[in-house]
Image (tube, rainbow, N blue to C red):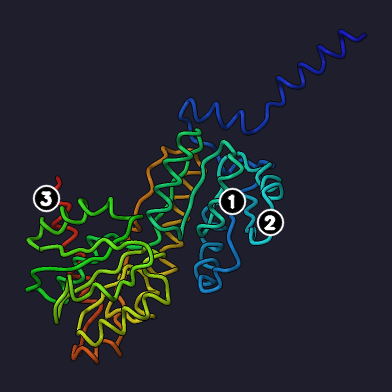
């Protein structure tokens, strides 16, 4: 009787393989997972309630995911007050994929080390690349879309605003100085000199404006939250105004604080890209490395533009010129 029970229990274990084992075998065989087939698993989307200014994106993303992953159990979960054990419980039924929105949610999601495909959005390139390096060594798959726009688009925006531009400036610190060779290489391809300054901890950015810029220069603001936190950026904007320096941002928020112009991806466009890439991830298609958003828009701070004596700037025309420059860039690489 005892041997019969052991045999029966073994049969149950063999027949009722956990879904994550099935997912692993499908991944090993590189076969897509059929999401249209009813299943008991869920798709958790973790976010933090501090993203109140991202409400439009969250709402648009929810609608996009409900359309693209119709019939799936998609759960939007606020991780702000959740412990690691509670997040682990939410991931228990996630057998294929999960998403983290924002840095806090992404880090909490990854800390569980669930062996599934992870996607991240609204996280800076510095942080997302670092997380990707760390967790890939642990066998945890991660990809996503960077929060900011690429340096090349900021450069193109500067060139669209001033076709005769000969140089741009950039401020870096110890956390992103390793990207300097990349930035110099991009600028050199367009015969633009890159003036730079690497700051030490606690150095005020505005202190170094006179070292790397002159009247009418362009300073590109990177997505460095420590170097350009809101309080520091406000001081930099004021200093740039008195020195007549044009600031070019890589996020929508930069223009709101006081850059002349910024390049960004609109919430609805980002939700479409995010949901499309996430669907591929959940279908177990080939995992691609994190990337920048493909779509973008330009915003002009009209008050700053007026102060700089810049009038009648057409954002649609600027976007068109940037698209042309990117097309030329791709053509050169072919």
Q: Give neighbour class at mark 1: few <14, some 14-19, many 20+ (Cα, 10 Å).
A: many
Q: Residue at x 19, y 68 (%)?
A: 169
Secondary structure found at label 3: helix
Separation of residues labelled 1 and 2 (CA atoms) = 9 Å
Residue on which disc 2 sits: 82
Between discs 2 and 3, the one toward the N terminus: 2
Label 1 with label 2: CB-CB less than 8 Å:
yes
Left or right of 41 in this view: 149: left
Residue 243 lies left or right of residue 19; in this view the side is: left
- Callouts 2 and 3 close, C-beta under 8 Å: no
**Residue position marked by numbered label 3 in the rendering:** 332
Picture residue at 42% right of the left edge, 75% below the top: 230
**In this rendering, is residue 252 above or below 280?**
below
Marks 3 and 1, the one that precedes in the sequence: 1
Secondary structure, mark 2, is: loop
Task: Give the quadrant of the N terminus.
Answer: top right
Choose top left, top right, bottom left or bottom right for residue 324.
bottom left
């Amino acid at each position: 009787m005892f041997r019969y029970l052991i045999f029966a229990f073994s049969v149950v274990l063999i027949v009722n393989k956990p879904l994550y084992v099935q997912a692993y075998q499908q991944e090993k065989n590189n076969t897509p997972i059929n999401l249209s087939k009813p299943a008991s698993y869920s798709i958790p989307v973790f976010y933090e309630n501090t993203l109140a200014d991202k409400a439009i994106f969250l709402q648009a993303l929810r609608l996009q995911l409900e359309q693209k992953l119709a019939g799936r159990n998609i759960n939007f979960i606020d991780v702000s007050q959740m412990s690691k054990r509670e997040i682990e419980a939410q991931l228990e039924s996630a057998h294929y994929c999960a998403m983290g929105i924002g840095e806090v949610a992404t880090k909490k999601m990854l800390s569980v080390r669930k062996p599934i495909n992870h996607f991240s959005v609204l996280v800076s390139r510095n942080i997302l690349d670092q997380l990707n390096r760390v967790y890939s060594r642990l066998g945890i798959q991660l990809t996503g879309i960077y929060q900011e726009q690429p340096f090349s688009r900021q450069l193109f925006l500067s060139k669209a605003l001033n076709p005769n531009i000969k140089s741009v400036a950039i401020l870096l610190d110890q956390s992103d100085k390793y990207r300097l060779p990349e930035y110099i290489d991009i600028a050199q391809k367009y015969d633009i000199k890159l003036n730079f300054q690497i700051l030490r901890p606690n150095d005020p950015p505005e202190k170094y404006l006179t070292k790397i810029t002159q009247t009418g220069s362009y300073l590109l603001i990177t997505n460095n939250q420590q170097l350009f936190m809101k309080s520091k950026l406000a001081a930099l904007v004021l200093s740039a105004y008195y020195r007549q320096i044009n600031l070019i941002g890589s996020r929508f928020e930069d223009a709101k604080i006081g850059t002349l112009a910024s390049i960004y991806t609109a919430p609805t466009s980002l939700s479409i890209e995010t949901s499309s890439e996430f669907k591929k991830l959940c279908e177990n298609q080939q995992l691609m490395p994190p990337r920048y958003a493909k779509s973008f828009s330009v915003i002009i701070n009209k008050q700053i533009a007026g102060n700089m004596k810049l009038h009648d700037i057409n954002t649609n025309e600027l976007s068109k010129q940037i698209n042309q420059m990117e097309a030329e860039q791709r053509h050169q690489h072919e």
